[in-house]
Image: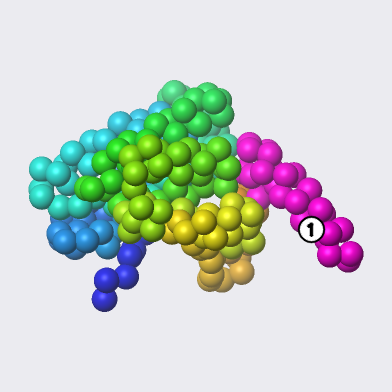
Amino acid sequence: MGVGIFVDAEETWIQDPIDEMVLQMMEKYNKEKVTVYNTYQLYCLNKLDHLKRDHKRCLQKGVLFGAKLVRGAYMEKERNRAEEKGYPSPIHPDKAATDRDYNEAVKYCVEHYETISSCCASHNADSNMLQVSEMNKKGIDRDHPNINFCQLYGMSDNITFNLAHAGYNAAKYVVYGPIKDVVPYLIRRTQENSSVTGEMSRELSMVDKELKRRGL
C-alpha cells in the first residue's frame, strides 16, 4: 500500500537479528521508494558505523535505504547489564559523545539524501536545526520526501509545529497499545527529555508563557 514501516530499535543484545531482518525487508520492498525503515540508536558506540555499513549494503543491492535516527532508550538498562555480565558498556560514556554521533548521522543522511530516506526523530532542538541547516546548504527542497522530522505527540510541539509551518515534513508519532506497555514507554521518554536534554523544562516555560499571553 506504500505506507512506510518504521521498525523500532531494542536492547543491544537482541538488536542484531532485528537489523538483519529489516535489511532483508529493505532489499525486498525498497526498490523504487523507501517503505521500510530501520531505527538507529546513536547512543550506541557502533551505530554510526552500522548506519554507514547498512547504507553501503543497500547500495550494493541496488535498493534505497531507510533510517530513523534516535538517541536511545535503554541507557540505564544497558549499563547495568554490562556491569552485571562483565563486559564494556556498549553506549557512549556521556551526552556529548552521543550528540556528536547523532549529528554526524544527520549530516550523513542529508549528504546522501538521494539514496537514503531519513527521519530525524528527536526532541533536541539543536539536532533539528542542524538538519534544516544541512538541507539549506545543499539546496534541498523543504518538502523533499526523503528528509523528515518527527516528535512524540504531546512533546516538543514547538519544534514540530514550527517545522511544519515552515514547510518541512514534520510529523507526530502517537503511542498506542495496552496501558501496561504504553505508560512505561511514555515515562522513559519523559525521563530522557528531562534528565538528558533539558527539553522538558524549556517546554514547560513556553507553555507557561503562552498561558499568560492568552490571559489564562
Q: Residue 207, located in which quarter of the rendered image?
A: bottom right
**Most distant residue in the bottom direction:** 1
**Residue 81 visible (yes or no):** no
Residue 163 coordinates in the image, percent (x, y): 53, 54
Which quarter shows the N terminus?
bottom left
Q: Residue at x 28, y 46 (%)?
A: 113
Whether residue 33 is situated above or below residue 198 in the rendered picture: below
Residue 149 coordinates in the image, percent (x, y): 46, 53
- What residue would you read off at disc 1? 210
Query: Is 187 placed left or right of 215 in the picture?
Result: left
Q: Residue 34, located in which quarter of the rendered image?
A: bottom left
Query: Is 109 placed left or right of 186 in the picture?
Result: left
Residue 74 vs residue 201, the one in the foreground? 201
Which quarter shows the C terminus?
bottom right
Whether residue 209 is situated above or below residue 54 in the rendered picture: below
Let me know if residue 191 is in the magenta part.
Answer: yes
The boundaries of the magenta stretch are: 190-216
Query: Is 30 placed left or right of 110 in the picture?
Result: left
Residue 132 vs residue 175, the one in the foreground? 132
Residue 78 coordinates in the image, percent (x, y): 50, 36
